[in-house]
Amino acid sequence: MKRLTALVILFPLLIFSQDQGETVGVPETEEEGVEDIGLKPGDDAPKFALRTTNGDYELLSKWCGENLSRPASQPIRHVVVASFFATWCQPCMKELPHLQNLYEKYQGQDVKFFLIDITEATRSVEGFEQSPQAGPFLAEKGITIPTLIDIYGMAKRNYGATTLPRLFVIDKLRKIRLHQAGFHEGEDFEGKLSTLVDELLAENFEK
């Protein structure tokens, strides 16, 4: 089974793409020291508040957790599927169409899909200055999943997303139920995620 991964190790920063079979070293950035903190199923998903491509903000706690942050306007707990990506990440391009299919499949159900874009957080890195902005880039590819902009890389740091894509499936109580690094070619990605999402949707919790 071939896994496609873009590896981002900051200190020094190293960008690696198995898809291209090449390794490029680039200078350290202000994000030096970022490491994979080893989040695993059963751990609490770190909270985030990130700007959308429309300029609004999304809070993870609005959609899942024991105490929702906006219960008056949004009282229903949701399953959350979030994937960290960047527009320069070639393995991410393999994952995106499958996520889009799942996003469309679960429209109208209690599931929130997010792409968390770290392009802006890496734009100062030599070679990535001209990386396309996520909004127009994804629109051109027909990807309509809500996209959150991790401008300063704080969510990436809190989730230890040192490899891309980095996928998390979070249950209604904000527990991580799946944590996957890279894209595994040959795997039934959509079937695997559908089975898990259906299982999590069936879980009921009192408000």
Image: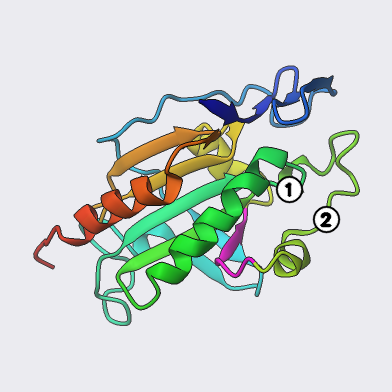
Percent coordinates x, y for residue 133 in the rendering? 79, 59
Please indicate whether residue 192 sits to the left or right of residue 157 in the image.
left
Mark 1 and mark 2 residues within 8 Å of each other at the beta carbon: yes
Measure how far apart labels 1 and 2 are at the Cα level. Answer: 8 Å
- Which is more toward the observer, 89 or 18? 18
Residue 41 vs residue 190, the one in the foreground? 190
Check the image and report above or below for 73 versus 20.
Answer: below
Amino acid type at image mark 2: Pro
> Which quadrant of the structure image shows residue 163?
top right
**Residue beneath label 2, please?**
132
Q: Is residue 113 left or right of residue 207?
A: right
Q: Residue furthest bottom?
A: 73
Between residues 135 and 202, which one lies in front from this camera angle?
Answer: 202
**In which quadrant of the rendered image does the C terminus lie?**
bottom left
Q: Residue 131 location in percent, x, y?
A: 84, 49
Instruction: Give the residue number, with chain letter if any, for mark 1.
Output: 119
| Residue in the image at 90% along x and 36% along y | 127
Image height of 81 relative to 25, above or below: below
Image mark for residue 183? none
- Mark 2: secondary structure: loop
Secondary-structure class at tag 1: loop
Residue beneath the point at 44% across and 61% down: 102
Number of marks in the image? 2
Between discs 1 and 2, the one toward the N terminus: 1
Mark 1 vs mark 2, foreground winner is 2
In this rendering, the answer to whether 150 lies above or below 55 is above
